[in-house]
Amino acid sequence: MVVFSNAIVVDGSASAPFCADVVIEADRIASVLPPLSIDDASCIDCSNLVLCPGFVDIHGHSDLEVLHSPSMRPKIGQGITTEVAGNCGIGVFPAEAGDPFLSELTGDVLGHYPNVGWPSFSSYITALKERGSGTNMAFLQAHSALRSHAMEGNANRMATDEEIQRMCLYLRQSLEEGCIGLSSGLYYAPCIFADTKELLALLSVVKSFDRLFSVHMRCEGSDILSSIEEVLDLARQSGVKLQISHLKVIGKKNQNLVPAMLSLIEEARVEGVDVQFDQYPYEYGSTSLFSLLPPAYLKLSRSDLKQALGSKTERNTIKTMMEAGRGWDSIASLCGWEEITVLLLQSNPRYEGLTMAEVAAMRNQDPYEAFFDLLSEEQGSALMTDVTQSQDSIKRILSHPLMCFGTDALYAGRKTHPRSHQAALHLLDRYWKQEPVLSLEQLIAKMTSCGAKRLGLSDRGLVARGYKADLVLFDPIALQDCSDERHPDAPSIGLRLVMVNGTIAFQDGKYTDSTSGSILLA
């Protein structure tokens, strides 16, 4: 038995905080009692400390990180006890082990893993159970893996009817084995090549299981409204539960579109569409440097791309397409080279931490030429951060009742975005302590019960009798996020304890490296 004595309980329901003793037996909350009900020397004194549910990350990418490092320190160290992986259409099953297309597809987001690929969700889960997990893990079936496996070769094209049928069969198997839904990344190859017929066929399977459709939309910049309409129409026609990933509007000139974007979602809710969205609490994002290229070039293999970049004519064509950005999000055009920072370049690490404008100046080149050269020279992973939105937009989306918390954390290389290590505590520090956008109880509800309810987890997300003992204890006065772009993994101040299923995973600055997390199957 573990007793949290005299804690300030923020229970995850958005109700006002209250003082209580919280008693843990095995992996569950046995009782919530008046403060100082239990007088025992073994009690954990929580006077002036906040006790809340473990945070739920509804948008993660730890599919391979959890195999590399089962204790999941980057998530535990920010109080996250539950994660949904397989987002943005990027995943590792079904696939043949060592599939080179899959390795190239997942490398910049999920990282690299020997002989990556599992023939089914159940075989992946078997591998995961052998290692264990520090956090609870749920999984979406990734659209890209379905396309790659069903199309047996080049998945960067429209699928045939027969190939769509195979995708549906693979999807059905994954849902039967416990995947909580389907994810797609309509911004990324190969999902970008899926037409409406393919998407509706897949969503009909998702609907038959009453599962979730999580989607990285086709455009998040100038065409955000039409992209919102596209996914809302898919939900209308199929009847699925729609989760829009990392909702934002990219580009300084487009921030005025945020109210219209939210209005479209609100109107769809009134019509009966079951739609919500998640958000990470930073004005800058992180993804592959290669994703700055137009879709027509994203579909090329690395070798074919390097050949194209060796042609001056091709470079001029790519530059023209990037400057125009018609029908897709050209981050270089929307944000500018001065807002794109090199996070990781395995072949040119000397440029890490510099903006692309600074890199170009160092090389005495036009930014486009510097960009093309870096991609041509790169033999491994290339990641970037990009300032995409305003603080006012973040706050407006954060305040919306349909928003719930996600990190979009990547672990693809030795350097990461701060959201991979401190997104949860950054959210509390920045938007409760520094700039109070919402109350503490409102923010914690968005980080706990909101995600748990969306995932159908009836025994997680609240501090209440009978619920799983996923808990976070922190000092509200001392709480401080110390991370930044140059020090993304700097530990925070004020986190006292993290418990997963009744087992302490972190306490007073020390990890126990427990693997008490559960695999959450639908």
Image (cartoon, helix red, strand yellow):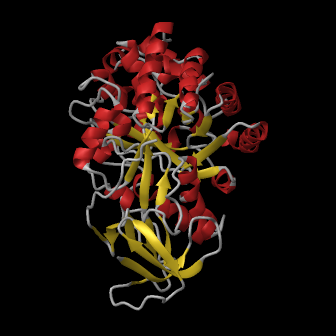
Is the N terminus in the top left, top right, bottom left or bottom right quadrant? bottom left
Q: Which image quadrant for residue 281?
A: bottom right
Camera sees residue 313:
yes
The spot of residue 151 in percent (x, y) is 40, 13
Q: Residue at x 35, y 41 (%)?
A: 63
Camera sees residue 487:
no
The spot of residue 127 in percent (x, y) is 25, 39
- Left/right placement of residue 125 relative to residue 79 reads left
Q: Which image quadrant for residue 244?
A: top right
Q: Residue at x 45, y 25 (%)?
A: 171
- Left/right placement of residue 387 relative to residue 106 reads right
User: Count the marks: how many?
Assistant: 0
Tell me: residue 32, above or below residue 513. below
Q: Residue at x 41, y 91 (%)?
A: 39
Tell me: residue 282, above or below residue 509. above
Tell me: residue 2, above or below residue 130. below
Residue 239 or 466: which is nearer the viewer?
466
The spot of residue 313 in percent (x, y) is 45, 11
